[in-house]
Amino acid sequence: MKKERIKVSPDVCTYNSEDNKTLILEISIPGVDKKDIDLRMLDDSFTLNAPREDVEFTVALSLCCPVRAAETKAEYHNGLLRIEAPYKDFMENAVQVKVA
């Protein structure tokens, strides 16, 4: 019989890059194999599932500001997942409205 893993929320630290153009997320998920990390980004939120033998790290969070999900980069080293998501220009999808 397969032992069920307990789900735990990992420690998440978010901050701006020095030039204020990128949102940085650092997530502590020690003991996880990189190939087992399931990270999904949207422009306004993300989900993470990262199982290891005894626990499954899982989290779903909204982001403070819209980001370019398709341009997000992530690296995993020594139990720390570092995500860099460039901020989206707030007027990027703005539509010119004709004033009558």
Image: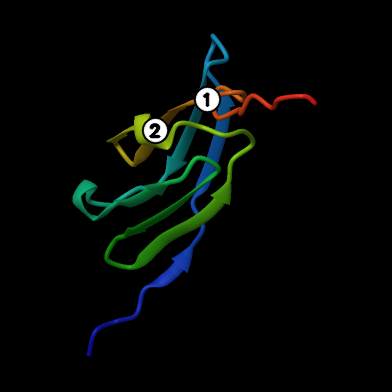
**Mark 2: which secondary structure?**
strand
Q: Residue most toward the bottom?
A: 1
The residue at the point 46 percent across, 45 percent down is: 42
Distance between the alpha carbons at the discs numbered 2 and 1: 16 Å
Q: Eyeballing the image, is 81 above or below 15? A: below
Name the residue nearer the viewer: 58 or 95.
Answer: 95
Number of other residues with Cα within 10 Å of mark 1, as a class: few under 14, some 14 to 19, many 20 or more: some
Residue drawn at point x = 52 percent, y = 25 percent:
87
Q: Residue at x 24, y 55 (%)?
A: 36
The quarter of the image holding the N terminus is bottom left
Using the image as rendered, state which of residue 33 and residue 35 is in the foreground.
Answer: 35
The mark closer to the camera, 2 or 1, is 1
In the picture, the disc for residue 8 is: none
The disc placed on residue 82 is 2
What is the secondary structure assignment of the residue under circle 1?
loop
Query: Which amino acid lies under the numbered mark 2 shown in the image of this protein?
Result: Arg
Q: Quadrant of the C terminus?
A: top right
CB-based contact (under 8 Å), mark 2 and mark 1: no
Q: Which residue is mark 1?
A: 87
In the picture provided, is 97 more to the left or to the right than 20? right
Q: Residue at x 54, y 9 (%)?
A: 19
Q: Residue furthest front?
A: 100
Q: Nearer the viewer, residue 7 or 78?
A: 7
